[in-house]
Amino acid sequence: MSNQLWQRKPVEHFEAEMRESKLKRVLGKFGLTSLGIGAIIGAGIFVMTGVGAKEYAGPALALSFVVAGIGCTFAALCYAEFASFLPVEGSAYAYSYATVGELFAWIIGWDLILEYGMAASAVAVGWSGYLAKFLLLFNIKFPLWLMNDVFTAKELVADAVNKGTLSTLTTHYSNIQLPSFMGVDLAINLPALLIIWLVTAILVRGIKQASGTNNIMVVVKVIVVLFIIIVGAQYINTANWTPFIPERGTYTDAMGGTHKAFGLLGIVSGAAYIFFAYIGFDTVSTHAGEAKNPQKDVPFGIIASLVISTILYILVALVLTGMVPYKEIDITAPIAAAFGAHGLGFAVLIISIAAIAGLTSVIIVMLLGQSRVFYAISKDGLISKKIFGELHSKFRTPWKANILIGAVVSLIAAFTPIEGISKMVNIGTLLAFVLVSLAVWIMRKKEPNRMRPFRAPAIWFVAPMGILFNLGMMLTLEWQNWARLFVWLVVGLLIYFMYGRKHSVLAKILLEEKQKQ
């Protein structure tokens, strides 16, 4: 058993699977870059900038993006090296299987499943918020209980009562009363649930259709992000940047919850909080099995999407905190609200449309990436191939996995607050980056002469810094995040030892070799 747990899957096996792959190779270097930008630019700009500035870093949120960007850069170089010589679907899961062993690979694969699923849920909730802002421009309103989960709905009412703005809240919804059943208040984020099912239907149809849809949305939102930067810069009040790094203190939310915020540690905490918006370059590597020239195109897509998106993030953060005092930022739709505060109604319309398009593209990429991780794990027998690895006869997509994932993710999005979901994503993302940085370092030691079309420069520095930067951000997250991660990993280990270890393809190969001896 111990031999199996730490047995590495030979790189030659991955290469053979790549040659036999039934997935269609339709993605070029710009298609992959677009997928990366599609995932990165979205929640980080349109949703998380508000919470990051108001609750963690203040105007110094721009520095949070710098810190997160540096940590990502180190991890991205490691991802790019692995993707160049191991261009198969599965991302960090496949890399870990080749370098450390089956148990380590299962842990990181299980972590990726959490990462992508929770990210799609969180973004769907943000999408719902911008849809509400968009419809409100045309005086189209829905009940509070149909547009929010019960926890968020109660917090909105409590916040409005505390600030004396309940009358304003009533203008945003047709009804702010929550229905109840047997004394239990009821609410559902219906738009978030529906957008997940719409994207799931697109993904079942196939990667080419999904990629085409994503490319259109990426062009739209990049143009609008540039619009936000250029127009918003005209309304910056530099007094809003003073103090640029607020004094360390305690933040208290509408429901009475508290946490430490601001100061230098607040910059790091802000980086950790908004970090999941960077997992876009990770999703590029999950599509190596569908790339036309994966050795060259995947590293290009990873690094290009990261650099472009980080620059845009920093500029938008500066514009947002310059337009509105950080204490007054709207956390549900911060960019649209900032322009609305300056009476720029036309800008609110444009930004809301871009946010809806942008967040849709993020959901597409997240659900696409998660289904490909499931597909890779199922090929190794660690989860059911019949459910997660079977391709549709016409569309050549893992359709059963797509539908199952859509069902679970839609329910999470419908009934869970965005803050709780996003914190689960952050710690999962950071863990994946730490493990990949470690894995590429190990692989350089174990197989230094293996052909690498792309080699991370100064690996002796890049890999350790990738580990330290991302682990450091993990350590700033509250203990509840660590507790949830621990529970998730325990559940994963139970599945592995009860099912995966017994059905492992690698285990069967080891057994056959042992019998031949």
Image (cartoon, rainbow, N blue to C red):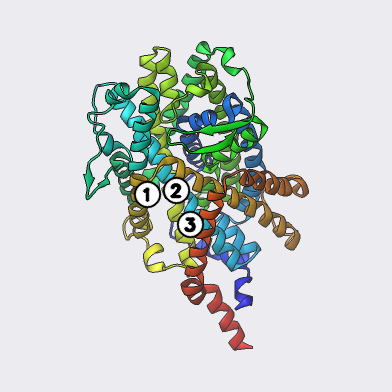
The structure residue drawn at horizontal position 62% and vertical position 51%, both measured from the top left corner, is 84
Q: Relative to 230, is 64 above or below?
A: below
Secondary structure, mark 2, is helix
Upstream in sequence: badge 2 or badge 3: 2
Three-letter amino acid code at the position of disc 3 = Val
Three-letter amino acid code at the position of disc 1 = Ile
Upstream in sequence: badge 1 or badge 3: 3
Label of residue 118 in the image: 2
Which dot, 1 or 3, sits closer to the camera?
A: 1
Q: CA distance from mark 2 to mark 3?
A: 14 Å
Mark 2 neighbour class, 10 Å CA radius: few under 14, some 14 to 19, many 20 or more = many
Residue 297 seen anywhere in this rendered image of the structure: yes
In the image, 417: left or right of 242? left
Mark 1 neighbour class, 10 Å CA radius: few under 14, some 14 to 19, many 20 or more = many
Tag 1 and tag 3, C-beta contact below 8 Å: no
Which dot, 2 or 3, sits closer to the camera?
A: 2
From the top left corner, tell me how far across and down residue 88 is, in percent: 54, 57
- The residue under label 3 is 373
The residue lying toward the viewer, choosing from 150 and 387, is: 150
The structure residue drawn at horizontal position 45% and vertical position 20%, both measured from the top left corner, is 338
Secondary structure, mark 3, is helix
Q: CA distance from mark 1 to mark 3?
A: 19 Å
